[in-house]
Amino acid sequence: MLNGLYVAASGMMMQERVVSNIANNLANVNTNGYKKDGFTFQNYIAKPKEFPEDIIRNSLYNQTINRTVKLYRNYLDLSEGAIHQTGNKFDLAIGGENGFFVVDTPWGIRFTRDGAFSINSNNELVNSNGYRVLSRNNQPIVINGDDVVFLPTGEVMVNGVQVDQINIATFEDNTRLQKVGRNLFAAVDILPVEMENPNIMQGYIEGSNVNAVQEMVKMIEANRGFETYQKVIQTIDQLNEKASNELGRIA
């Protein structure tokens, strides 16, 4: 009976984590450039420390009743979100899913897909958190003028003259990117590479890649799974209680 409790409890924990992840994705359905999170799980059975060739331990029945669920890995879905036209000359979107804007933060250089930019009091291009957007020289982009054009290849034109070129970074392995909050990513044990022909679109914003309908369907499925595991635990608990009471009367 206890084996069933462990299996059902691990299933409940799995579904609880799925629900929490879906809720976070749904909370960011309207966040510019947001990339949804996902998890994968796998079966887990404790490895024997003694008698590894034990016939009973290796039987299908034993592996079934002792098999629990554990988190295998979490991952980022970096697929491109929908592109929306805003008409704002400082709103930028990157065509494709591999490029990232480079921003200077108090914690070092970070990367983002959120291209909702503006100009600060020093005429520097900044993101929605006030962090400066960097050029290919890793310097702030200063814009003094009203006629501002961002070319698809990244050149910044002010009053018909190129003043800088925005830095668009790409990575050989996007799985090394880690969310660090504020819609930013940090590169873990990997260096960025300047992206050629990033296809920058001025006056557009990339939205979240969360599909609200799909996430709601997943939420319903996860809640049903949680309730099923919960009922299994309640049933096992009732059987254990009944068995204890009846054995006590027989004794």
Image (cartoon, grey):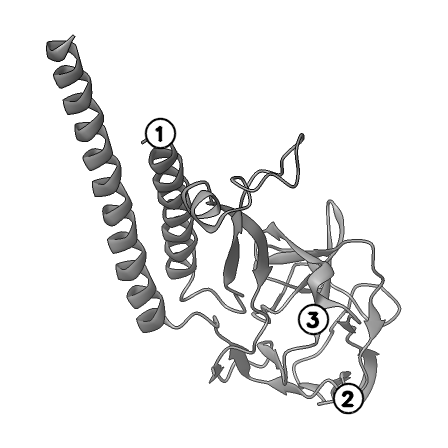
State the mark number for residue 2: 1
Q: Which mark is residue 100?
A: 3
- Near mark 3 (Cα within 10 A), the count class, few <14, some 14-19 or many ≥20, is many
Q: Nearer the viewer, residue 219 or 6?
A: 6
Q: Nearer the viewer, mark 3 or mark 1?
A: 1
Q: Earlier in the sequence, mark 2 or mark 1?
A: 1
Give the class, few, some or many, for how many residues have Cα within 10 Å of label 2's Cα (few <14, many ≥20): some
For the C terminus, the image quarter is top left
Q: Earlier in the sequence, mark 3 or mark 1?
A: 1
Disc 2 element: loop
Question: Looking at the picture, how far across and down is residue 162, in whole percent?
Answer: 82, 85
The number of numbered badges drawn on the structure is 3
Tag 3: amino acid: Phe
**Circle number at residue 56:** none
Q: Are marks 2 and 1 in contact (CB under 8 Å)?
A: no
| Residue at numbered disc 2 | 197
State the CA–CA distance, disc 3 to disc 2.
13 Å
- Residue 58, compared with residue 153, is above or below; it is above
Disc 3 from disc 1: Cα separation: 50 Å
Type of the residue with mark 2: Asn
The residue at 80%/79% (across/down) is 195
Image coordinates of residue 100 in percent, x first then y, are 69, 71
Q: Answer left or right for 130 relative to 18.
A: right
